[in-house]
Amino acid sequence: MIELLRKLLENNVDIYEKDTNGKTALHYAAQNKCKEAVEIFIQYGAYLNSCDIYKQTALHYAVGRNCKEIVELLVSNGADINAKNVNGHTALYYIVSNDSKEIAEYLIAHGISINSQDCNGNTALHYAVQSCNRDIVDVLLEHGAYVNLKNNNGCSAMFYTGDKEIMKLLITYGAFMNLKDNKGLLPIHYAFYSNNIKAVKGFIKNGATINEVDIYGQTLLFSAVYRNFFDMVKLLIKNGISINAEDKEGLTILDYAICEDSMNEMVRLLISFDAIGSSNGRYPNKLLFNCSNRNYK
């Protein structure tokens, strides 16, 4: 097969020709991990930065296929190490899925932009954290990834962690626990909305604010009660969240819970922690009626 390839090139076959996906023969050689073919294409002057319809170069494919030899071959012969695909991803982003520390370190050593942001403002660190890839997170941070860089939604990598070891790594490298996104939410909110109680515990242990209010003046406790997250409610209360805080309507969480027929057990739980209704709540008569008729003890 290699000899046939040489003969074709010697007879001036078009080395730059692309198929319907915009791929050249070099793309396929890299994708199929055929180092010898890549060497021949380079020898015959193949354009190393040719892009397919997704703006992926041969380097993207070589990294995606976890082929360090071809990666080194392409980079050493002038491939654009910071070329971005249609989503704004450099080859470094592909490391997250194939988990190759060696290739990551090679690319970084040869000048790939470690803090490059894609079309959504995410860096390779955002994706590595989201994928719970501890090894790659460690490599990126060790080589200078900016831990508090925000994406287009205002989220740093910390917003996407659900792994306590990765959380420790991020904190070690200076991650802010109480950074707010574009909606005013904190990293702990993201863990909370996923009902990831282990991550919420980790955030609280490391100093995350739990009494922060949203645009309605409501804390995480309100959201936990609405969702019937019993264990989360207990965790928040035991860690000092204000159980009788009033929102912008002047209502406490008990005011809301008492008015829902499906929340009897939650109401009992709140009352067991000395929750009270607001003095100027919207439903004082409803609160009195329900407490009288549901036998809360």
Image (cartoon, rainbow, N blue to C red):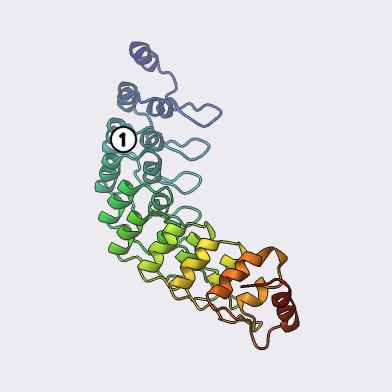
Quadrant of the snapshot with the N terminus: top left
Q: Identify which amino acid the numbered label 1 is placed on.
A: Val
In the rendered structure, the answer to whether residue 269 lies left or right of residue 45 reads right
Q: Position of residue 107 (x, y in %)?
A: 29, 44
10 Å neighbourhood of mark 1: few (<14), some, or many (≥20)? many
Question: Measuring 65% from the left and 88% from the top, which residue is drawn there?
Answer: 279
- Secondary element under disc 1, as helix, strand or loop, is helix
Question: Measuring 28% from the left and 63% from the top, which residue is drawn there?
Answer: 172
Q: Read off the residue under disc 1.
A: 71
In this picture, is 84 found above or below 21?
Answer: below
Nearer the observer, 124 or 220: 220
Nearer the observer, 260 or 26: 260
Q: Is residue 118 visible?
A: yes
In the rendered structure, the answer to whether residue 73 lies left or right of residue 124 reads left
Nearer the observer, 210 or 141: 210
Question: Measuring 42% from the left and 50% from the top, which residue is drawn there?
Answer: 127
